[in-house]
Image (cartoon, rainbow, N blue to C red):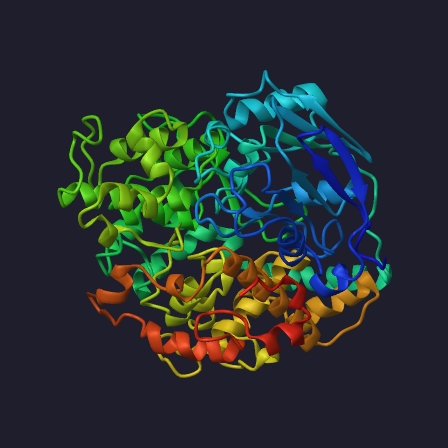
C-alpha cells in the first residue's frame, strides 16, 4: 500500500460483538480512492435490492480519505455511507470537524459496522486499540450531555460521534453529531437512524492518536500547502468574515433563496434581518472551523435572553439553516433560528429536511389538507416561530403520530395526508431540497433530479459554476449560463464527477468555489501523498466510476428514470416577482441529453460499454 493509507479498516460485527481489522481490498484504493467512492464499493458488496435500511443487513460505513491528517488544508473530513432509511436508496453524508482526522491518527482508514447489538453500545478507539462497551446509561441522552459524559469517562480530548433521541428512535431525518457543542453533522439521508437501528450510541476516538498518515514526498507536500494556505484564506475571506450565512442576502438578490415554501421570488426586508452580517453583529461569540482548517467558516453563537435563549454558547446556524428556518418559513426572528438549530443539533435531526417538512406542513395547514385535529391543536403557518420550534421537538422525539409522520420525510407525509399534499412537498427520491432554487440554476435542477441520494446541492454545486465560478482544467474557463439547455448535461455530469473526487480525497468543497484551488493542485497533492501519479482525466474517471457505482446500487433497488424528476412546484411554477422571472427547467429534454452524456440507457441504467470502460461489470444488477 502506498502513502495516504494505513491499509487498515476496522470491521465491527455488532451482532457478535467482534472487531476485525482488515486491509483495504486489493486495487480499491487506486480504483475508488477513499471516502465516498470507496465506501460505495464496500456498500455495494454487502447489500442488494431486498436489504432493509433499518435492518441488521445494512452496514454503517465511516470512511476517511488520503488527505486526512496531512497538511492539506480543509482535508480532514469524512464520509458516512449506508442505505438511506429516508429514500430507500444510496445514502451518504459528508462531515467535517475533528473526527476524521483523529480516526486517521489512530491508524484507521475507516470503520464498517455490520449487524445489530441487543443493547446500547459505544465503540471506544484508543490509539490502535478498539473495544465495544455498554452504553445503556447514555441511551436517551441528548447530544451535549452525551458528549460531556463520554469526555468525563474517556478523557477530555476524545472526539465523539453521537446520536440523539431521534437516532435512537430511528427517525429517518436523524443525523450523526460530532464535536459536542461545536456540532458538526453527518446530516443528510438518515445516517443517525441507521446507527440507532444498530443500538450504537456513540463512537469515541482518542484525541491523542499518534499514527501519522504515510506521505511519499513529505517535504514537497509541506512546502506546497504552506505556500498555498494564505492564498486559500484570501480567496475565501468572505466565508472567514461572515460565515456561509453571509451569502443569504446575495441569494435573495439573485433569486436563489427559498421563501414561503418556494412560492415567493424575493423578500429584501426578511433577508436583511437574518443574513450572516446580522449573525456576526448580534449573536456571534467567535469564529471557528473544522480541525486544522484555515477557512474558519463556522460560528459559535449565544442568545442570552428571551424565549429563544440558547443553552450557553453553541454552534451557530449556517446558510442552509438560516434560510430553512428563516426565509423558507417566512420567519425573520434570528434568535428563533439559532434556537431551532440548537434543538436540531441536540435531538440529532437534519436542519435542511426538518425545516422543509415544517414548511410543507405549514402549507398543508393553510390549504386545509390538515387541521388542528391532525396537529393536536397546534396552529401552523408561516412566520410562526413558536409553532416551528414545537414541531422540531415533535419530529426529533417521535412521540406522537403527527411528529412521527413528518419525521419520515415529506414524501411519506404527503402520502399519509393525501389530497393535494404532494403539490407542497419539495423532495426528490424522498430527500428534501436544500436551500438553492433549481429555477435559478437549471444545472442544479438536473443534478437534483439525477443525484444518487436525491436533491443535493453538493452533488454538483452547479449553481456556483453558473454564477461566477470556473474550472478551466475541465473545459470551463468561463462561468456557464444558468438557464440554458445547451451544454447543461455535460456540465452537470462533469461537476458530479468532480464532486465525487472531492468526496473521496476527502476535502471540503468550498476549496473549488471562486477558483480557490485548482484541480491540478489537488492532483499534485494526491501524488505527493500517495506516490501515485496520474492525470486530471485519471482523477475524473475515479469520480465517474464512483458516481456510476452509486447509480447501480440505486438501480438494484428499483430507482431509475421514473424517480429522476423534480417536485411538482419546480416543474410547474415560474419564479416571478420583483426583478425575477425564471422559467422552470426543461427537465425532460435535459434528462435525455444527460443519459446520452453518461452512456446510460433510456431507462436510466448505465449501459454495458460504460460499465466495461469503468470496470464495474461485477456490480451491475441482474436485468
**Residue 387 seen in the current view:** yes
**Where residue 81 appears, x then y in whole percent?**
59, 48
Given residues 343 and 117, the one toward you in this image is 117
The quadrant of the rendering that contains the N terminus is: bottom right
Horizontal side of 545 relative to 68 (left or right) equals: left
**Where residue 572 appears, x then y in whole percent?**
22, 66
Horizontal side of 584 relative to 469 (left or right) equals: left
Q: In the orientation shown, which residue stands out farthest toward the front?
A: 623
Horizontal side of 254 relative to 221 (left or right) equals: left
**Residue 480 seen in the current view:** no
Given residues 14 and 71, the one toward you in this image is 14
**Dividing the picture into quarters, in which one does residue 542 lie?**
bottom right
Question: Can you say whether 227 is above or below 196 in the image?
Answer: below
Given residues 329 and 225, the one toward you in this image is 329
Residue in the image at 42% along x and 62% along y: 448
Count of numbered labels shown in the rendering: 0
Question: Can you say whether 347 is above or below 135 in the image?
Answer: below
Residue in the image at 70% along x and 74% along y: 538
**Dividing the picture into quarters, in which one does residue 336 lie?**
top left
Q: In the orientation shown, which residue stands out farthest toward the top?
A: 137
**Dividing the picture into quarters, in which one does residue 358 lie?**
top left
Question: Can you say whether 572 is above or below 598 in the image?
Answer: above
Residue in the image at 36% along x and 29% along y: 393
**Where residue 494 appears, x then y in whole percent?**
54, 74
Given residues 56 and 320, the one toward you in this image is 56
**Where residue 226 appears, x then y in whole percent?**
74, 60
Residue in the image at 48% along x and 42% along y: 190
Amino acid at each position: 500500500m502506498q502513502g495516504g493509507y494505513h491499509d487498515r479498516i476496522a470491521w465491527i460485527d455488532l451482532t457478535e460483538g467482534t472487531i476485525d481489522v482488515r486491509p483495504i481490498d486489493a486495487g480499491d484504493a487506486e480504483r475508488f480512492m477513499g471516502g465516498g467512492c470507496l465506501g460505495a464499493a464496500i456498500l455495494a458488496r454487502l447489500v442488494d435490492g431486498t436489504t432493509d435500511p433499518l435492518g441488521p443487513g445494512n452496514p454503517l460505513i465511516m470512511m476517511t480519505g488520503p488527505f486526512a491528517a496531512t497538511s492539506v488544508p480543509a482535508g480532514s473530513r469524512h464520509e458516512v455511507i449506508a442505505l438511506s432509511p429516508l429514500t430507500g436508496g444510496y445514502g451518504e453524508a459528508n462531515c467535517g470537524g475533528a473526527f476524521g482526522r483523529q480516526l486517521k491518527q489512530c491508524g484507521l482508514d475507516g470503520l464498517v459496522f455490520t449487524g445489530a447489538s441487543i443493547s446500547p453500545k459505544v465503540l471506544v478507539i484508543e490509539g490502535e486499540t478498539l473495544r465495544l462497551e455498554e452504553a445503556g446509561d447514555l441511551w436517551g441522552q441528548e447530544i451535549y450531555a452525551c458528549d460531556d459524559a463520554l469526555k468525563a469517562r474517556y478523557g477530555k480530548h476524545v472526539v465523539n460521534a453521537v446520536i440523539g433521541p431521534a437516532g435512537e428512535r430511528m427517525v429517518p431525518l436523524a443525523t450523526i453529531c460530532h464535536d459536542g457543542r461545536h456540532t458538526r453533522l453527518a446530516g443528510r439521508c438518515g445516517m443517525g437512524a441507521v446507527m440507532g437501528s444498530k443500538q450504537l450510541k456513540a463512537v469515541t476516538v482518542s484525541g491523542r492518536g499518534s499514527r501519522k498518515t504515510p506521505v511519499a514526498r513529505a517535504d514537497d507536500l509541506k512546502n506546497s500547502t504552506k505556500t498555498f494556505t494564505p492564498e486559500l484564506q484570501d480567496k475565501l475571506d468572505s466565508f472567514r468574515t461572515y460565515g456561509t450565512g453571509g451569502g443569504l442576502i446575495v441569494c435573495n438578490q439573485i433569486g436563489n433563496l427559498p421563501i414561503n415554501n418556494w412560492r415567493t421570488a424575493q423578500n429584501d426586508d426578511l433577508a436583511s434581518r437574518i443574513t450572516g452580517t446580522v449573525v456576526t453583529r448580534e449573536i456571534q461569540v467567535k469564529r471557528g472551523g473544522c480541525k486544522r482548517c484555515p477557512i474558519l467558516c463556522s460560528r459559535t453563537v449565544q442568545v442570552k435572553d428571551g424565549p429563544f435563549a440558547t443553552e450557553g454558547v453553541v454552534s451557530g446556524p449556517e446558510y442552509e439553516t438560516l434560510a430553512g428556518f428563516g426565509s423558507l418559513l417566512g420567519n425573520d426572528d434570528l434568535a428563533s433560528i439559532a434556537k431551532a438549530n440548537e434543538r436540531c443539533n441536540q435531538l440529532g435531526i437534519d436542519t435542511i429536511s426538518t425545516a422543509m417538512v415544517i414548511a410543507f406542513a405549514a402549507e398543508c395547514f393553510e390549504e386545509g389538507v390538515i387541521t388542528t385535529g391532525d396537529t393536536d391543536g397546534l396552529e401552523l403557518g408561516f412566520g410562526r416561530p413558536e409553532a416551528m420550534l414545537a414541531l422540531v421537538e415533535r419530529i426529533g422525539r417521535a412521540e406522537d403520530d403527527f411528529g412521527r409522520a413528518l419525521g419520515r420525510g415529506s414524501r411519506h407525509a404527503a402520502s399519509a395526508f393525501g389530497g393535494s399534499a404532494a403539490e407542497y412537498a419539495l423532495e426528490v427520491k424522498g430527500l428534501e431540497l436544500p436551500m438553492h432554487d433549481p429555477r435559478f440554476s437549471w444545472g442544479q435542477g438536473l443534478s437534483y433530479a439525477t443525484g444518487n441520494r436525491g436533491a443535493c446541492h453538493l452533488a454538483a454545486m452547479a449553481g456556483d459554476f453558473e454564477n461566477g465560478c470556473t474550472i478551466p482544467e475541465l473545459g470551463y474557463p468561463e462561468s456557464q449560463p444558468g438557464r440554458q439547455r445547451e451544454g447543461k448535461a455535460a456540465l452537470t455530469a462533469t461537476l458530479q464527477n468532480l464532486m465525487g473526487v472531492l468526496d473521496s480525497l476527502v476535502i471540503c468543497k468550498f476549496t473549488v468555489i471562486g477558483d480557490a484551488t485548482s484541480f491540478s493542485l489537488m492532483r499534485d497533492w494526491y501524488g505527493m501523498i500517495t506516490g501515485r501519479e496520474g492525470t486530471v482525466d485519471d482523477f475524473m474517471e475515479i469520480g465517474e466510476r464512483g458516481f456510476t457505482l452509486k447509480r447501480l446500487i440505486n438501480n438494484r433497488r428499483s430507482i431509475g428514470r421514473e424517480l429522476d424528476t423534480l417536485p411538482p412546484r419546480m416543474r410547474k411554477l415560474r419564479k416571478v416577482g420583483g426583478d425575477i422571472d425564471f422559467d422552470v427547467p426543461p427537465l425532460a429534454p435535459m434528462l435525455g441529453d444527460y443519459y446520452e452524456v453518461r452512456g446510460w440507457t433510456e431507462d436510466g441504467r448505465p449501459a454495458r460499454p460504460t460499465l466495461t470502460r469503468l470496470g464495474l461489470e461485477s456490480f451491475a444488477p441482474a436485468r
